[in-house]
Amino acid sequence: MEPPKDPNQDVERLLRILGQQQPSEAEPPYSPPRIIYAEAINVGFIIAWVALQWGLHSFLQLFPLHGVDAWIVTLFIYLFAFSTLFPIVVFIYVDTRIILIRAAHAVRTEKQRFKS
């Protein structure tokens, strides 16, 4: 049987795709405290996104719009909502994927250790 694959290879590939650089060897790329901080920042961004959407909706209620104006504003509200939420979702996916890669590596390592 081949030894388990190093999870840092997958992490490095994900970071290359995103155009980010790998941190130095002295500091692990995604140690548990960094993952917690990254997820807290992601949650903060989502909370800010919800607050911004709510504020925008409340602000636009001050201006009664009808007809084509209402359709255009609605279209831009949805476009703005999607375009600001998409990057947050991508970073949440990447962080979660890194956690899953590390967890799978730990499971494979333990299986190898118990098999031998």
Image: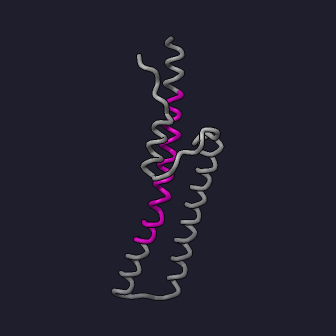
Main SS, magenta region, reads helix
- Observer-nearest of 34 and 51: 34
- Observer-nearest of 21 and 71: 21
Membership of 84 in magenta stretch = yes
Question: Where in the figure is residue 61, as x and y percent of width and height?
Answer: 51, 83
Membership of 104 in magenta stretch = yes
- Segment colored magenta: 79-106
Look at 63% across and 41% down and name the residue there: 27
Figure label count: 0
Question: Where in the figure is residue 39, as x and y percent of width and height?
Answer: 58, 50
- Observer-nearest of 13 and 55: 13
**Residue placed furthest toward the top:** 116
Question: Where in the figure is residue 104, as x and y percent of width and height?
Answer: 49, 31
Look at 54% across and 79% down and name the residue there: 58
- The picture quadrant where one finds residue 81 is bottom left
Look at 52% across and 49% down and name the residue there: 21
> Is 23 placed above or below 78 here?
above
Look at 59% across and 50% down and name the residue there: 38
Colour scheme in the image? one colour
User: Could you tell me which quadrant the N terminus lies in?
Assistant: top left
